[in-house]
Image (spheres, rainbow, N blue to C red):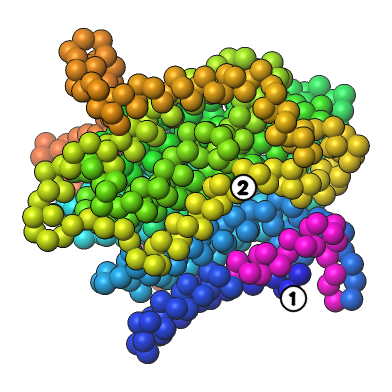
Amino acid sequence: MLPYAPWIVWALPIIIAFTHPITERISHRLRDFIAVAAGFVSAIFAASMIPDIIAGSIYLDGVYHDIPFDWILARWIPVDGIEVTVGVIVDSLSVFMANVVAWISSFILLYSVEYMHGDRGITRYWMLMNLFIGFMELLVLGDSLITIFFGWEGVGFASYALIGYWYTDEKRYWIGPYSPSHAGMKAFITTRIGDVGLMTAMLIIFIYSGTFNLIELANNIGWAVNLARDGLLTITLLLMLLGPIGKSAQFPLHEWLPEAMAGPTTVSALIHAATMVKAGVYFLARFTLVLYNVAHMADGLGPLLNSIQEFYIAVTFIGAFTAFLAASQGMVADQIKKVLAYSTVSQLGYMFTAFGVTGLLIHHQEAFAEAYMTGLYHLLSHALFKALLFLSAGAIGHAIESYMLKDMGGLRKYMPKTYLLMLIGAFGLSGIPPFNGFWSKDAILHVAFSEGYIIVYIVLAATAIITVFYTFRMIGLAFFGEESEHVKHLIHEGRKPHDPGIYMLASLYFLAGGTILSGFLIPNIGLFFSRNFEYLGISMEILSEIPAFTTNFFTTTLLSPLFIVALGIIVVGLYPSYRIYIKNVVSPVEVVGEGLLKKIWIFLYNRWYINAAYYKIFVDGTQWIADSIFSYIECNGGGNLLKSLYTSLSNVVRRVQTGYLRVNMGYMGLAIVFIILYYLVMG
């Protein structure tokens, strides 16, 4: 490991962010170079930690330290023996996430050089992007709940500012009826609801444990035992779950993410595909390791184990329902970025389900390790193919100046490279072998089925069918058929759509390569995480029995009866999409008609009316209360009543507080008498 690598990974982008206003005055090219270089330097330091994880120890200051390694920088608030530390944890999970964030972010920054060229707020953009990356790295490397929370809130601030980046609210940047500034505020408020729950849970745990440190929480179960004894463990864990639900846009706090597409497409790729929305999933993965230790050390304590079980049941079913809910909305979305946004919510639901099932298997070491791995593997797969899809969509929007699907069509012959690259991302999202999405999504389905969670398996399988359908609907509407009137108009004006330049293409090629190759890495990833599992007491003998950790994973998957089901899912989803949107055999208007399908289409297009209900209750309701109070006070004499009340009160106070010295001395005497009487009575 390069010296102080974990600290440089998160601190460097944050420090560099504040240099951009200065370097801008020297040279715009220097500013752009430093912004991108900060990302790649951070990624190199993140990669330097991988050999240490594989070796199982870190060589630092002449001493070998075992993995996990808790590197404490400072101690905060030393009061009555309670110490709150700030530090980083170096283990398989943190290094894995740090590299996912750093490398994908770096190529998104490279893509931004061309995509954001000429934007008048580019310095602010670079500053916020670097801040976001730094805080996200702090989040995944933090060794305690408080350190993670600092990164968590930093990411929230940067995300809010980047979603509302085009704060002047020009109509071309709107997402449906919502302006960028509105979308940014919506994301900020919705995720804060979850954050309040997370912060409350953190404080409860601190009160019972006296520490925020994750390793200490894992190795000292007294806090969990006492919470369970007081009947508070379930509610504490569910309050904690609100944070991941908000950050990872799960039901019922999922409605912010579709509007988050109001920001630049690079922001969508960075925050809402590859990194920020993974924060909730990462937190689940991290705290699951804590709860695993707690459950095994407290074996036989029924109330404690029941609370953990109830928590993971909630995670499982929230994830499965959200996956289906969002996928159904993606079927009818009319903007290419909104299709991908709904898809992101849906795929995050898969990850939540995977970790929910993981927690339910906490006493079955082999099954626990396999389920845990499937969630993390799908996190990696999704980060790659979804970033590729978003950046491909950005190339389309850059070329035709629109993200509406009705403004596309026939782009395959004008943008052949973009078409092929986006098709690779579509194959990954749809789970078509041998692309990464097939292996990771099939692994989640396999775990759900093999462990007996049949309802969950059916919901996820149905979601997978819908995913294939809307993915190739998007491809068909964008690249096949005749050119739209919008495209024809651009061609007529001499602005024919074309593939992007070298910076944008380089990033797309990297992500496309990752989407293809990462599908073959699962045995290596399994061995990479074996160090964490060994720390939990899961032996290598047990790990060697798990297909996900051995090179026969592919053979096992291909020979499984569920492989036939996986192929059937692809066919059932692809066939109607292919005929309607690629071959144009039948018009989608004819398919929908005017009957039941039309009503279902309207229901889905209106997002199950959940978003409308939220606005009606929380926005319109709050406005109604404010208007009612204003109307009463200002228009119906309420103001005069309050004025009379305050006037009467002030007259009484004026009589008591005369300002005369003799009166004040009298008050002091009375006070002394009351104090003496109090101590006489109280003994």
Q: Distance between the residues labelled 2 and 1?
A: 29 Å
Q: Residue at x 59, y 55 (%)?
A: 100
**Which quadrant of the figure contains the N terminus?**
bottom right
Q: Residue 518 carries which label?
A: 2
Q: Which range of residues does the magenta coloring cover?
A: 42-61
Amino acid on which disc 2 is placed: Ser
Residue 54 included in the magenta stretch of the image:
yes
Q: Where is residue 665 in the image (x, y as percent from the top left)?
A: 47, 67
Q: Position of residue 596 (x, y in %)?
A: 25, 10
- Camera-nearest label, 2 or 1: 2
Q: Residue at x 49, y 46 (%)?
A: 385
Task: Kindly identify which residue carries mark 1.
Answer: 3
Earlier residue among tags 2 and 1: 1
Asked whether 679 or 432 is in front, the reply is: 432
Q: Position of residue 51 (x, y in %)?
A: 78, 62
Residue 46 included in the magenta stretch of the image:
yes
